[in-house]
Image (cartoon, rainbow, N blue to C red):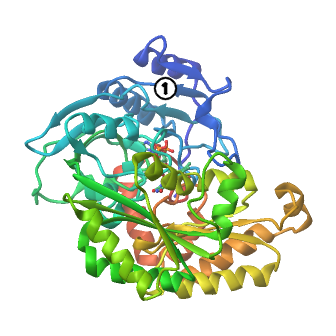
Amino acid sequence: MNHNLNPPDKQTLNKLKAIVGTGGWALGSQPTRHFDDPRGRFKGKACLILLPSTTEQVAEIVLQCNSSKLSIVPFSGGSGVVAGQLSLDSDHAIVLSLEKMNKVRDISVDDGVVVAEAGCILENIHNTAQQHGLMFPLSMASKGSCCIGGNLATNAGGIQVLRHGNARDLCLGIEAVLPNGAVYSELSPLRKNNTGYDLRNLLIGSEGTLGIITAATLIVKPIDPESVTALCAVESPAQALMVFKQLRKAMGDNISALELMSKFGLELVIEHFPSLQLPFSLNHRWFLLVEVAGHKGIGSRFEEALANCLEQELIADATMAQSQTQQTNLWDLRENTPEANRAGGAFCSSDTAVPISKVDAFIEHTTNAIYDIHASLQINTYGHIGDGNIHHNVLPPTGHAKATFINENPGIVELVRMAINDATVKFDGSISAEHGIGRLKVRDLELYAGETKLAAIRRIKEALDPNGIMNPGALIDR
Ligand SMILES: Cc1cc2nc3c(=O)[nH]c(=O)nc-3n(C[C@H](O)[C@H](O)[C@H](O)COP(=O)(O)OP(=O)(O)OC[C@H]3O[C@@H](n4cnc5c(N)ncnc54)[C@H](O)[C@@H]3O)c2cc1C
């Protein structure tokens, strides 16, 4: 698709500024956090940043941009890691940030829902639900900065997908402004609604290319009376999967999180976050962070199940958090992993999902393929193993700075990236488990999605956004 989007003229810019009023806009020529990539790899551009406060303002902006053929880049928390929220090659874009639309509009204990505006920070939704004895289960390391609009636009996953599903599974209704400026609103808390095409599910995961999500009705659940976290040492990913199988038999659906970490990954976290504590010495190669949640007494059932795993020598060591502080410390080891990767100079970060039955073979194959490219690379393999979602972060050899290493090894970033992609395809996986396509994986989607899917995506985009104003360059090429 090739649309000729216009650079904005002064008169149109003034109209857009007038829609949001003083304090509702900033010039793109000023330094702004809206251009920052969380991994520090590149900078976004724009001519104007608009900060609407209401859905009506969003609709007026989109209507104006559509009639003037101006491109819009939707922005919520800016924590996306595939540059979907960053215009990288054109400063003609209007960044539309939802940050002022940050109200929880309603909470209904009877319907089990929260209605939140797109700019609500995920952690604030957690806190609001908690005040009513409820919880919103979507959670991830970026919870303090990402917003529900971005979570839905990327169909985010995170650490509790195993038990509660991803963003899509936790959303009953959507309010959004479509590319023609029309407001689509189905925010009712209905659990059944088979009335034609499901626009909600089309908008979820569309990464700002089909409209701007302005609010959502989200499923909240009663807080589990008990939740227990343990860190277990295992010898291999294969053994981690055997532990999962065993625990699933004993705990059923009460396993809410299952995170794989490696010795190297934990050493990296401790190097960059020295105040964190390891509960035992790192004599083992792999670690499994497990959380179970449910009725009172679930902790003792979990302890029993872990004891069985120890007895069968599936687990080499285990520690169970005895207090909230210990639980937080265990989670901090996991949640600081992305930042430790960044600080350690990771030059390649993958987001693969493979069938759970193939996780261990996938890890082994990928690791060998990366070492074949350069035997001294450092690989931090970790992720939501219970969902088959593995992240490989590849760092330069010890003692080598990222920039120098990449300069001295031209083409290595692409070689490693393609080795991981090829392995992903070989093991029937997805090249984007939870982060989306953004601007970084457009070519990969073209390579791997298949003609039928690509053609359908293009037709849907063309039908809903004929002028191509919504996030051009993200997800599919213009
Ligand atoms: C440390 C760290 C840990 C992370 N862990 C996870 C994880 O475990 N699981 C996971 O899934 N992701 C994770 N992420 C990635 C990121 O946090 C998620 O993709 C998140 O859902 C993005 O939300 P955001 O509000 O920051 O969106 P943004 O970055 O602002 O935008 C992301 C995309 O959505 C579009 N968009 C934003 N708002 C809207 C809207 N209102 N309407 C339409 N389109 C919109 C943007 O144009 C862009 O394409 C992590 C990121 C970091 C930095």
Q: Quadrant of the C terminus?
A: bottom right
**Residue 120 seen:** yes
Q: Where's residue 164, x and y in %?
A: 28, 60
Residue for point 63% across, 28% down: 32
In the picture as drawn, the residue positioned furthest to the top comes out as 22
Q: What residue is shown at x 22% (from left), y 61% (from top)?
A: 297
The image quarter containing residue 292 is bottom left
Q: Is residue 165 left or right of residue 77?
A: left
Q: Position of residue 402 (x, y in %)?
A: 82, 57
| Residue type (three-letter) at the residue carrying disc 1 | Leu
Task: From the top left corner, tell me how far across and down residue 184 is, in percent.
Answer: 23, 41
The one nearer the camera, 337 or 204, is: 337
Q: Is residue 67 above or below residue 283?
A: above
Q: How far across and how far down the image is residue 175, in percent?
A: 26, 40
Count of numbered badges drawn on the protein: 1
Residue toward you, 413 or 267: 267
Q: Residue furthest right?
A: 408
Q: Ligand 1 closer than 8 Å to the CB at disc 1?
A: no
* Camera sees residue 180: no
Q: Left or right: where does residue 303 sit relative to residue 232?
A: left
| Residue ID at (69%, 46%) | 40
Residue at 39% across, 51% down:
139
Q: Label 1: state its secondary structure.
A: strand
Tell me which corner region of the image, top left, top right, bottom left or bottom right, holds residue 86. top right
Image: 409 above or below 41? below
Q: In front: 336, or 367?
A: 336
Nearer-the-camera pick, 28 or 325: 325
Q: Categorize mark 1 by other alpha carbons within 10 Å: few (<14), some (14-19), many (20+).
A: many
Residue 21, above or below 360: above
- The residue that disc 1 covers is 50
